[in-house]
Amino acid sequence: MFTNNDNRYLARYACLSSESRGRVHNDDTLIFGRSEYQRDRDRIIHSEAFRRLKDKTQVFIFHKGDHYRTRLTHTLEVSQIARSIAKALNINEDLTETIALAHDLGHPPLGHKGEDILQKLMVNVGGFNHNEQSLRVVTILEKKYPNFDGLNLTYETLEGLVKHNGPFLDLNKIPQTIKDICLLLDIDLKTHSSLEGQVANISDDIAYLTHDFDDGLREKLFSLNDLRKIEIINYILKNIESNFINIKDDILIHQLIRHLISYFINDVVSNSLKILKKNNFNNVNEIKVYGKKTVKLSKDASSSMEEIRKFLFKKMYHNESIVKKLDQNALMIEKLFLLFIKDIHTLPEQWKYFKGQILSELSQKEKLRVIADYIAGMTDNYLKREYDKFYK
């Protein structure tokens, strides 16, 4: 029986440790009053994949500045926003934080450009998707325990990762790793995730659509005056400036992001509480089969977020100089991938085997997946070092 120490004050529709569906493999008995979700969180934080996030691109690659965000700082920001929302909704903070901390473990080097290249290279053998790769990391690729591969996380954590972007409505487009996990754990892909999973998902959007302003301004991709064209940002800036005359720009930017995060958190909490109260949910399952998201922004806040998203895509994510640099560096992924296909002996020793079998004896599809696993785990810096080893 799982411990019950995190269940005392939670809402009836929260995920409770005492009601967890458990893990695939039997595990050690918990001590010191820890919950199962705390164990999941700690295993993620202590994983090698988590540590590598510090040198993986968020937006800017190989940047010399000390204050630009990486995939790790983004992940930590997501987890803190998620905890704040979970606390306000009276649901399980530990599970919410755990899903948030794990959601980007499968991101390859060079951000979404790296993902696009791997998808192109893997298109005929199952494709590549960073959400699926996160699940491969926690169920297969992390090797820390004598009795099983992966981290042996709870059903609830894995379900939150599987449904990170909602239910799978097209059952023909389900990645193989997700199919395997769902068969093993009997996860229903057609339903929504728990509230904890939904909170982790929306916290991801809030984090990157607010914090990326900071990096974009630092890189001079746009100015504060450009941001004033966005209605919610103009409102926040005017409010700050009316209270603090002659405020310095660097402090104004920090205060803008702080207030913008608070705006979205407050909105998603108040709007979600209305939905929860109106529907009078009694348990987690009623949340899952509700048929639509329970955790979501109001219409006005959602419109503001979409306006911000369009601005950042135009001014930052699709900025010509950034895209050009990513395109140039993404060639390293492609050339290494093709090199490893041509000669698998160029792989490091530990990657010449998969589940006890020699790579050369596996099918071409299995070989390509192992090569994708290896490259996806690389940091930006390691990618460059490996590339220089073969091509410089």
Image: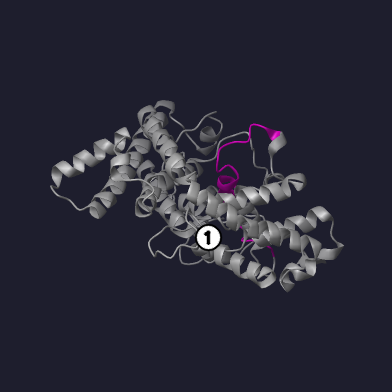
Left or right, 371 with reference to 196: right
Q: Is residue 342 left or right of residue 171?
A: right
The residue located at (55%, 43%) in the rendering is: 164
Compared with residue 368, is residue 292 higher up or lower down, i.e. above or below?
above
Q: Which residue is mark 1?
A: 56
Pick the residue in front: 174 or 63.
63
Horizontally, is 331 left or right of 196 in the view?
right
* Span highlighted in magenta in the image: 148-171
Asked whether 300 or 60 is in front, the reply is 60
Residue 373 in the image: above or below residue 210 = below
Task: Tell me residue 304's x, y (percent).
Answer: 37, 33
Does the rendering let one see residue 134?
A: yes
Front-lying residue, 301 or 43? 301
Q: What colour scheme does the image use?
A: one colour
Where is residue 224? Give x, y as percent.
29, 44
**Which residue appears at 37% of the width and 47% of the height?**
213
What predominant SS class does the magenta segment belong to? Answer: loop
Can residue 5 be spotted in the picture? no
Residue 293 belongs to the span the image colors magenta: no
Residue situated in front as seen by the camera: 100 or 86: 100
Q: Answer few, some or many: residues within 10 Å of disc 1's Cα (few below 14, many 20 plus, some between 14 and 19).
A: many
Q: Position of residue 76 (x, y in %)?
A: 43, 57
Could you say which quadrant of the image residue 266 lies in? top left
State the residue at coordinates (71%, 50%). Answer: 121
Query: Residue at the spot x=76%, y=56% of the render?
Result: 368
Above or below, 49 against 122 in this view is below
Residue at disc 1, secondary structure: loop
> Is residue 162 within the magenta segment?
yes
Disc 1 residue type (three-letter): Lys
